[in-house]
Image (spheres, coloured by chain):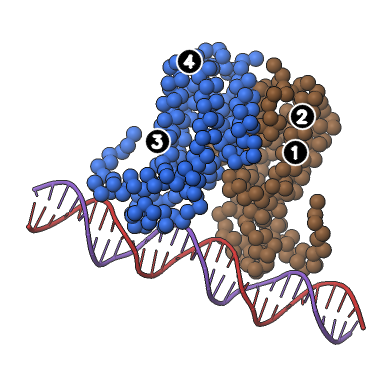
Chain colours: A blue, B brown, C red, D purple
Amino acid sequence: MNTAKPLRADARRNRDALVAKARELFADGSFFDLRFDDFARLAGVGTGTLYRHFPTREALAEAVYRGEVAALCDRVRDLRAQLPAADALAAFLRGMVEYVDAHRGLARTLATLMATRSGALAEGGLALEQAVVELVRAGVAEGTVRDDVEPSAVMMALHGITAAHDRPHWRAEADSVVTVVLAGLKPR
Amino acid sequence: MNTAKPLRADARRNRDALVAKARELFADGSFFDLRFDDFARLAGVGTGTLYRHFPTREALAEAVYRGEVAALCDRVRDLRAQLPAADALAAFLRGMVEYVDAHRGLARTLATLMATRSGALAEGGLALEQAVVELVRAGVAEGTVRDDVEPSAVMMALHGITAAHDRPHWRAEADSVVTVVLAGLKPR
DNA sequence: GATAAAACGGAGACTATCTCCACTTCGAAG
DNA sequence: CTTCGAAGTGGAGATAGTCTCCGTTTTATC
C-alpha cells in the first residue's frame, strides 16, 4: 500500500507530531477554523515543515482520517464474518450513525472534504466504499438484498447522513434514513 | 416574504446585473473558481457595490438559487394537487434527479452551501424542505407512506444525492437511491 | 568525525477578501 | 427646472491567510 517510505527519524517525529495535534483539534471541531500556519506552531514545527509533509489542509485531514477509516473497514469485515450479510449491513449502518454521533469532528471533516471534492480522501474513502459495496453484493448473493440497485447507492445515502450532521434533530433523522434504506433494500 | 424593499433605480439595476452574471457563471460551473473581486468587474460594477449587495459569495449564490427553489416548490405543489401523495413524492424525487442531472452547476452550489453551512440558503432551503415534508406527511395520512420515520429523512437522502453529483456513475446511483428510499417508505 | 543528503523553519512574497470614504447619481420637494 | 439630502458607487489600499524560498541544522553513512 505504501510506496517505499524510508523516512528520516526527525521527519517521522515531526510528521507524527502534526498528525497527533490534528487529531486533537478534530475532537473539538476547531480544525477548520484555525489558520494553517498557526497550526504548525501549535504542533511545534515550522510552517515549511508543515507544508512539506501536508501540502494542503485536506491532506492533513486525510492522514488523521486514514486510521479511522481503516478501523471502519475492519469493522465491516468483522461483521461480515460473524453475521449474514443483510444483518451485517444493518449493524454497520446503525453503528456508523452511532459513530458519527460520537465523533462530530470527523463527520464535519468528511462532509467538508467531500464537498470540496479535494480528492484527498480518495484512498481511504474508496477503501470504505469498497468494503460496503462488497457487503451489499454479499447480501445480493445471499438473496436478502434486492439486486436491481447500485450497491454504491448505500454510500450515497450514508454521505447524506454525515454531511448533515449538524441539523437539530440529526440523530432521529439519521436513524430514519437508515431504517428506510434497509427496508428499501429488501428484495420485493 | 420581502421585508420592505424600496430599492433605488440604479441600485436595482446593479443588483440585477450581478445576479444575471452569477447565473451565467453557474452554468459553466466557474462560479466557485472565480475571484470574488474579479466577478464584480465582470458584472460591470465596483467591488464595493458587489459587497454591499452581497456580503458573501454564498449570499449571491443564494440569490440566484432562490428562483430555482421557488420553481421546485411550485412543482411539489403541482404534483401534490394532481396525484396521490405517494405518487407525487415519487414523481418529485425522480424529477429532482433529472433536474440536478441537467443543472450540474446548481448541484455543486447546493452541495457547497450545505457543506459550508453558511446558513445562506436557510430561507430557500427551508421552503423546499417544508414542501417535501408536507408531501411525506400527506402520504402518511393517506396510508401509503410508513409513519414511523422522520419526514425530513427524505431531504437528507436527497442531499446525499446532490452532494455527490460528480461521481462517475452518478445518475445510476442517484436513481438507485431514489428507488431504495421510495421502496423503504412503503408501510410494512 | 567528515561529508552529503535530507529535513527544518520562519521571514516575507503573494493573493484573495473586504473596508472605507470621497465622489456620483437619484428623486422628492419647491 | 433647480436644488439638496439621501442613497448608492467604485476602487485604492488595509488586512489577513497561504505558501515559497533558501540559509541553517540534523541525520545517516562511511
Instruction: Estimate how packed mark 2 is, as few (under 14), some (14 to 19) or many (20 or more) residues with alpha carbons within 10 Å.
Output: some
Residues at marks 2 and 3, CA–CA distance in whole angstroms: 41 Å
Q: Amino acid at mark 4?
A: Leu
Where residue A140 sits, quadrant-wise, is: top right
Q: Chain of mark 1?
A: B
Q: Secondary structure at mark 4?
A: loop
Residues at marks 1 and 3, CA–CA distance in whole angstroms: 39 Å
Residues at marks 3 and 4, CA–CA distance in whole angstroms: 24 Å
Tell me the residue at 64%/39% (across/down). Answer: A168
Check disc 2 and report the residue beneath it. Answer: B137
**Does label 4 lie on the same chain as label 3?**
yes
Check disc 1 and report the residue beneath it. Answer: B130
Q: Are marks 4 and 2 in contact (CB under 8 Å)?
A: no
Q: Nearer the viewer, residue A16 or A48?
A: A16
Tell me the residue at 46%/33% (across/down). Answer: A126
Image quadrant where one finds the C terminus of chain B: top right
Q: Are marks 1 and 3 in contact (CB under 8 Å)?
A: no
Check disc 4 and report the residue beneath it. Answer: A83
